[in-house]
């Protein structure tokens, strides 16, 4: 069972940047699609970004496109989320997730929480205005 541990959250001013990391416990991580989701108080967990297992494609929510970048280093069993131009509405607990996708899974699949079997415990991002 893959365990995921996020880090890098914190308090940042609006317009600032943060880089979140998610370390996986097993090398099998390299075969999984990886995603980032976030959940603000009283809101549902929502998709932020995802990447195919081989890094060949990335997917972003419209609200973060152009500001956030997902990347992965399979040699380090780690996926990253670089967040720039942060806004107060980006404040949330950020979760990384891993899942096995088939070659036939399209972009919609990568945005679905139910497609991810493994989840981290979350890291808090707070953005002050």
Image: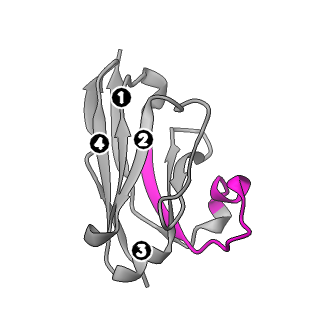
Residue beneath label 1, please? 84
Residue 2 lies, in percent from the top left, at: 41, 79
The reply to whether callout 1 and callout 4 are in contact (CB within 8 Å) is no
- Report whether 102 appears left or right of 123: right
As for residue 106 lying within the magenta part, the answer is: yes
Crowding around mark 3 (Cα neighbors within 10 Å: few <14, some 14 to 19, many 20+) is many
Residue 9 lies, in percent from the top left, at: 29, 43
Tell me which corner region of the image, top left, top right, bottom left or bottom right, holds residue 77: bottom left
- Report whether 86 appears left or right of 111: left
In the rendered image of this protein, does residue 40 appear above or below residue 5?
A: above
Q: What element carries label 1?
A: loop
Give the alpha-carbon distance from disc 3 to disc 4, as whole Å. Answer: 20 Å
The label shown at residue 19 is: 4
Tell me which corner region of the image, top left, top right, bottom left or bottom right, holds residue 79: bottom left
Residue beneath label 2, please? 69
Crowding around mark 2 (Cα neighbors within 10 Å: few <14, some 14 to 19, many 20+) is some
Q: Which residue is drawn at the image coordinates 62% and 32% (left, top)?
A: 62
Give whichever of discs 2 and 4 has the lower sequence position: 4
Give whichever of discs 3 and 1 has the lower sequence position: 3
Furthest-top residue in view? 129
Q: Which residue is drawn at the image coordinates 38% and 22% (left, top)?
A: 85
Residue beneath label 3, please? 30
Pair 3/1: label in front: 3
The reply to whether callout 2 and callout 3 are in contact (CB within 8 Å) is no
Give the alpha-carbon distance from disc 2 to disc 1, as whole Å. Answer: 9 Å
Give whichever of discs 3 and 4 has the lower sequence position: 4
In the rendered image of this protein, does residue 5 appear above or below residue 26?
A: above
Q: What stretch is highlighted in magenta?
A: 93-113
Pair 3/4: label in front: 3
Tell me which corner region of the image, top left, top right, bottom left or bottom right, holds residue 21: bottom left
């Amino acid at each position: 069972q893959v365990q995921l541990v996020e880090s890098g959250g914190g308090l940042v001013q609006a317009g600032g940047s943060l880089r979140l990391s998610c370390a996986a416990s097993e090398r099998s991580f390299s075969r999984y699609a990886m995603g980032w989701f976030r959940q603000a108080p009283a809101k549902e967990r929502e998709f932020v970004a995802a990447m195919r297992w081989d890094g060949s494609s990335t997917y972003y929510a419209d609200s973060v496109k152009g500001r956030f970048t997902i990347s992965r280093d399979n040699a380090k069993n780690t996926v990253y989320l670089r967040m720039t131009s942060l806004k107060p509405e980006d404040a949330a607990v950020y979760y990384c997730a891993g899942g096995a996708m088939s070659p036939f899974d399209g972009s919609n699949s990568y945005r679905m929480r139910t497609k991810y079997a493994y989840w981290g415990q979350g890291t808090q991002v707070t953005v002050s205005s």
